Image (cartoon, grey):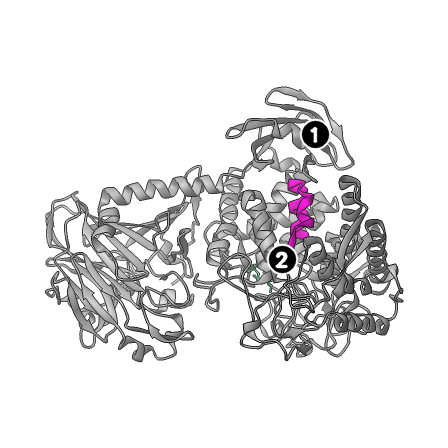
Amino acid sequence: MAHKKIAGWQFTGQNGEFSLEQPDRSSFLYFPLVNEGGMMSSVTPQLHGQVTSGHNTFLTPPLSVEDLHNSRASRNFWVYIDGKGAWSAAGNSARQHAEAYSETADDSLLEAGLLWHKVTRENRQLGIKAEVTSLVPVGSDKVELMKVVLTNMGTGEILITPTAAIPLYARSADDLRDHRHVTSLLNRIYTLDYGVEVQPALSFDERGHRVNHTSYGVFGAEEDGALPVGFFPVQEEFIGEGGSLDWPEAVVWNAEPQSGRDGALHSEGYEALGGIRFASVPLLPGQSRSYVVVMVIGNDRIDVEELMGKYGSAAAFDAELTANKQFWADKVNTVSFHTGDDSADQWMKWVTLQPVLRRLYGNSFLPYHDYGRGGRGWRDLWQDCLALLIMEPEDVRSLLLNNYAGVRIDGSNATIIGQHPGEFIADRNNIPRVWMDHGAWPFMTTLLYLNQSGDLDFLLQEQTYFRDSFMSRCRERDSSWEPAAGSSLRTSAGEVYTGTILEHILLQNLVPFFNVGEHNNILLEGADWNDGLDMAAQRGESVTFTAFYGDNLYELSELLRTLKDRTGSGTLELAEEMLLLLDSLGESVDYASVSAKQERLNRYYAAAPNRVSGIRAELKLEQVADDLARKAEWIFSHLRSNEWVESVHGGGWFNGYYNNDGERVEGETAGGVRMTLTGQVFPLLGRAAAPEQIPHMIASVERNLFDAVIGYRLNSDFGGIQQNLGRAFGFAFGHKENGAMFSHMTVMYGNALYKRGYVREGYKVLDSLYSLSVNFELSRMYPGIPEYINEKGRGMYTYLTGSASWLLLTMVTEVFGVKGLLGDLLLAPKLVKEQFDAQGRASIKTLFAGRELEVVYTSTGSAEYGEYQIHGITLNGAVVTLQRVSEGVLIPRAVLQALPEGQVHELKVELA
Ligand code: G1P
C-alpha cells in the first residue's frame, strides 16, 4: 500500500509549540524530557523511549533507536473496556499494531513544546480517547510525570479498568548484555500505597559488586489523589505464560491485581514492573477521568508519601506543566530572532535549546546516542561553551577556567572528563590517543569570551596542568607516575605547578606547530575533528587543522599586542622550557625543515618530561607576538603554495589530509574526485585561504560536494574503505562521517563564508540546513537541527549535536552581526533581503554586557547585503553617535553598562 502523503509538523504557538498529525506513521521520532536535577528521559508518540539518570541507573530498559519500534518494553497505559476488551492509550498493543495500516487504526495527534509532550489518541470503534501528557518537572527531583485523561467518545456508558504498566529495569546499562538475568535476581520489589518500588540489593557493573542504594519506582494516583487498587509488580506474572508486554494476560483477561497495597516486600529476584491497577469506573458519554503516573529514581528508598504529596494529583501535574513551560521558555528566550519568516524564527528556538540539552545529556541517553556512557568529550566541552556564552554567559568564565586544568604540558589534554567542573580523570583503560584538533578549540572559545566580555585579566589567571602516565603526546609512558601521585603537574621540587591561562593556550598551539609529518603539516595523530579519521596515526597529516592552528597563532600574536596596549605591561612569564618553542627568541628553527621541527619538539619533551622546573622566564610580549606571527605567516604561505589542489575545471581547492601511506588525499583522479568540506572550512574560517582563492573554493564545493537532495556533503565518494585513513570510510557513503550532510561542518562552512564576506553564499548554506531539517517528508524529525542528514534525507541523531551551538553563534554574531570586540558591542549585520519582514524589519533579542538588548534593524533603502550601511542608531530613543570601525559600528561597553539591569533596551538601527 502506498504511504499517505505526510503533512509534517506545524508551529502552533509563539514558544516553539508544534503539532503533528498521525505521528505513529513516522519512525524514529523521539522527544527529550530533562531537568537540571539529572533526570534524562526520551519519549515517542507511542510513549516508548527511556528514563534514566545515568549510565548505571536506568529506570526503563536502555535502548537504541531501533528498539523504539521493535521492543515492546515501554511505558504503557492500558484501558480495559467491559465488553470490548483491551486498548493501549499509548497505541502500543498487539491489536493496535496489527491495525496500524487499516481503517480501524487510532487517530493520533502529537503536540509538544518547551519541554512537554502530549499525544492524543482516539479509537472510533471503541469510542475512547486518551490524552497523555509527559514532562520531567523542573528542579532537582529525578522524576518523570505522565498524566492520562481518558474520555468516553461513544454514545453509551462504558465501564473502564485502567492499568499503568512501566517496565522497571532498575540497573546499569551494562547489564543489558552482561548478566541481564543474573542481575534480575538482585531485585527487591516492594508494593506500597501508590505503586511499585525496586531497590536491587547489589549493583554488578564496572564499579564492582557493591551494596546498591539507588531505588526506582513507578507510582500512580487518580486525578483527586485517590489510591490505586492494586499492583502487578512482576513482569512475568503480568504478561502471563505465553504473553507479552504488548498483549499482557493481566489486562487482556482483566485479571485481579497480584498484590494489594501491603507496603511490604512483595518479591525478590524477578524482572519488575510498575504495574498499577486503578479502580474500574463507569464513564458516561463525554465524561473523562484522569490519572497521574510518577516515575522516580531515588538515591535510596523513596519517601512515597512526600513524592505523591508533591506530584500525585491532576492539579499538581498541571502546576508542574505551567512551571515547565515558563522555565524553558525563559531559558530559550534569552536569545530570539524576528525575521520575515516566523516559522524559521520558531525553529531557531529549538536550535537554541539544543546546546542546553547537550549540556544536560552530554552525548548519551537519547535513542540514537546508544554508545555514550555519559559525559562529554574535550572538543564538545569547548564548543558547547560557544552557545553558553550567548545564553548563560555568567557561568562561562569559571567553566573555561576549570576546563584549562585538563591541558597537559605536552599541549595535549585529558580525554576523560569528570562529573565536576575542572575534574579530569586519568585513563585507566590505558588507551593512548591524542586528537590533534583538541588544542585548537579552547583558544577559539576563549577569544569569543574575551571579545564578548573584554575580560583580558582572564588570560593572566593561573591554573594547574593535567598529568597522567602519558607524555610526549602519548608517544611515551612516564613509568614513575602512579595514580596516587595525583593528576596535577608538579615541579622538580614536587610542588603543584600553575601557569597562566595564556601559557596553557600558547602551549596548545605551539606544540602542534612543531609536530609535523613528512609534508610539513601537523600530524593527524589519533584523529582530528572527524573522529572517524582514526587509521593514519603514523604518517597521516591534517592540513586543514594546520590552517586552524596557523590562524590561532596569528590571533594570539594580535592578542599579545592588544594585551600590551591595554595593560601597559610589556612582559609575560612562561615556563622556562617553553622558550624552546619560541625559537626565534633564541636559537631559530628552519620551519621548512621537518626534521628540524621534530628535533626541536623532542628537545622540548625532554626538557619538560611530565614535570617542569618551576622556573619562569620573563619575556617581552612584543617578541613573543613576533614569533607567533612569524609561525602563522609560515603556515599560511606553506599551505597556499603546497596544499592547493588544481582542478581541470580551473581554480581548485585545499587538500585537507595526507593518509598513512603519506599520500595526498584530495584531488581529481581517473577514479573520481576526492574532496572534503573540512579541508575547505578551516582555511576559510581563518586567514590561510588567500582572498583570491575563496571563489575557487566555493565553486569546487558547489561542484563536488553539493547535492540537491541532501545539501553540502562532508566529502565526495572515495569509493570504498580507506584503511590508511579511517573507519569513517567503512560507513556506507552518504551516512554520518562519510559523505552525509554533517551539520556541524556545514554550519562552520556557512560561518566561514559570512566571515569572509560571502554573505549570499553563506545564506544559501544556512538556508539549506534549515530547509533540509524542516522537510518532514524526508527528514522525519521534530524541529531542530540534526547531527546529519543521511543519503535518504532523514535527519539523524537529533537534538545532541555541536552544530546547534555553531548555528546559534552564527546567527547572532554573523547574520545579525551582534558581537563583542574586546568588550565593546560591534554591530555588523549581514542580513539578506529575504530576512527582513514586510515592514523592512529584522530584529534580535540577546544578552550583552549583562543587559538584555533588542536590536531592531530597519531598512529604509535596499535590504540587500552590500547595498546598505548603518545610517543611524538610537538607544531607547536617544541618538547614539556613530563610532565606525572597518567592520561596522561600535557601541562602547560603558554605554551599555550604564543602562539599568532587568529590562529590555532597544537599539534601533537604521540601514540605508
Ligand atoms: C560529533 C561529535 C563531534 C565530532 C563530530 C565528527 O558531532 O560530537 O565532537 O567532531 O561528531 O566526528 P556532533 O554530534 O556534535 O555534531
Residue type of the residue flagged with mark 1? Ser
Q: Residues within 10 Å of mark 2 (few under 14, many from 20)?
A: many
**Distance (Cα) linking label 1 and label 2:** 46 Å
Q: Which mark is residue 836?
A: none
Residue 455 included in the magenta stretch of the image: yes
Of helix, strand and loop, which mostly describes the magenta segment? Answer: helix
Q: Taking the image as four quarters, which one is ligand 1 found in?
A: bottom right
Image vertical order of residue 490 relative to residue 481, above or below: above
In which quarter of the view is residue 644 placed? bottom right
Q: Residue furthest top?
A: 878
Q: Residues within 10 Å of mark 1 (few under 14, many from 20)?
A: some
* 604 horizontally vs 590: left or right: left
Element at badge 2?
A: helix
In the figure, is residue 431 to the left or right of 262? Answer: right
x then y, percent, for residue 717: 66, 69
Quadrant showing the C terminus: top right
Residue 417 location (% of width, % of height): 54, 63
| Residue range highlighted in magenta | 444-464
Q: Quadrant of residue 673?
A: bottom right
**451 displayed left or right of 179:** right
Q: What is the x, y in percent for residue 866?
A: 74, 36
733 up-or-down from 390: above or below? below
Query: Which label belongs to residue 862?
Result: 1
Residue most toward the front?
A: 493
Q: Is residue 390 magenta?
A: no
Q: Which residue is mark 2?
A: 404
Is residue 427 among what the camera can see?
Answer: no
The three-letter code of the residue at mark 2 reads Tyr
